[in-house]
Amino acid sequence: MKQTRSPWAWVPTLYFAEGIPYVTVMTISLIMYKRLGMSNTDITLYTSWLYLPWVIKPFWSPFIDLVKTKRWWITAMQLLVGAALGGVAFTVPGPWWLQGTLFFFWLMAFASATHDIAADGFYMLGLDQHCQALFVGIRSTFYRIATIVGQGFLVMLAGNLEVLTRNVRYSWSLMFYFMAGMLIALWLYHNWALPRPDEDSDRDGMTGSMLVSELKYTFVTFFRKPQVWAGICFMLFYRMPEGLLTKVSALFLIDPGHNGGLGLSPAEYGFVQGTVGVVGLTLGGILGGIAAGSHGLKHWLWPMVCAITLPDAVYVYLSYAMPSDLIIINACVFVEQFGYGFGFSAYMLYLIYYSRGEHKTSHYALCTALMALSMMIPGLFAGALQEAVGYRTFFIIVMLTCSLTFIVSSFLKIDPEFGKKTNGK
């Protein structure tokens, strides 16, 4: 392997570049459309469809191995994401802003999902096993930093521009032009900084028909695993409450008081959700990993089930109390996100547990597709449901759906030793 760059020169920026388009498509788009006056029904419906590229990612991921190198795919997709961000910026002020921005968000979503495949594969090719283990925390950290920058700084920037320009559309347009410049800069940097490992080459002798046959075999073996239906139900319904809550909770925070929301400005939202919320999510995830490593997934499953469901009750409280104190709002969001981070650890560990054995990489990709589907389906109708019943009743319905999380978790059979730290490893 030809290693010409220190991992510090490219791993942090690579995963920062991976996180920016995802948070843009999944979160920033929500806030922008709300500020442009769209209904919650339309916002959640349109933006939930943007999960689709991650749902179908396993179907085209083998072809990334067949065509070009992973390094080529990374740089090409970063350039495409930059162009898509520029397209959003260009179309926001225009008469066809909805059709135009949705087109470019779709383009960004497909480019982002493809970038994920290439970047994760390149990570394993560009680093030896020691460096892979050493930098796994670094890559996660910089992905989280991208989330903080996206949900926090960039949303706050758009909000402050609204105050300065007194024009919502031009403010968001300027912010997206800034993002486009940032992605183009990352593209230029990675053209220079990414190493060129010998293993990163076209797969000679592998034809498209062979890859299709391999993909079919992956699906067959996936559905022959023990407890397949219990596992699929767990992957689809464990996050059902969060799938309903995620998009609507963001809209609730910024919706004006006369609509039943808390009426936060974009700058306030950026701080509450983009910084405090992400910190809570990160700390919860770290603690969840430490806990599972000490006694195993089976031991911590039910505490994690409670953690990912019960803190959702803070939104029931917020919808009744309607506090204006940012400290209270921050505390509630922190509790909910911390619980989600802790409880989500069980979900991710189970995906690894289910994927064990032959074709574990391909099976894990299918598991992550089901994970994306579990968020996409509830999101499609979450906004319509909220507008039909109001925020308070909606959050009560979310709490009722927590029963699904408990039910699907009860059917799992997990090796008590899975996840435990053994023999100093």
Image: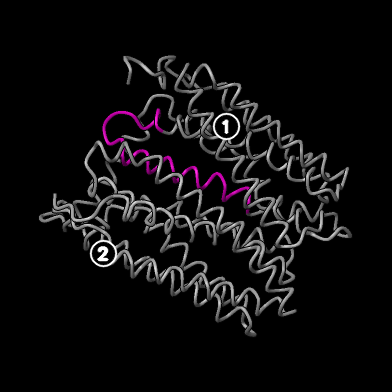
Does residue 172 sit above or below 341 in this rendering? below
Q: Is residue 49 in sight in this rendering?
A: no
Does residue 51 sit above or below 332 in this rendering? below
Magenta span:
352-379
Horizontal relation, residue 259 to residue 127: left or right: right
Measured as percent of width and height from the top left, residue 34 is found at: 71, 65
Horizontal relation, residue 230 to residue 115: left or right: right
Residue displayed at 79% across by 56% down: 387
Horizontal relation, residue 205 to residue 265: left or right: left
Residue furthest out toward the left: 205
Give amino acid for label 1. Answer: Phe
Residue displayed at 42% across by 16% down: 415
Q: Quadrant of residue 164?
A: bottom right
Horizontal relation, residue 269 to residue 194: left or right: right
Q: Quadrant of residue 237?
A: top right
Local crowd size for mark 1, using a 10 Å CA cut-off: few (<14), some (14–19), many (≥20): many
Q: Is residue 335 magenta?
A: no
Q: Is residue 232 in sight in this rendering?
A: yes
> Which residue is denoted by mark 1 in the rendering?
342
Check disc 1 and report its element: helix, strand or loop. Answer: helix
Measured as percent of width and height from the top left, residue 116 is found at: 38, 54
> Which residue is denoted by mark 2 in the rendering?
72
Check disc 2 and report its element: helix, strand or loop. Answer: helix
Q: CA distance from mark 2 to mark 1?
A: 36 Å
Measured as percent of width and height from the top left, residue 168 is found at: 71, 76
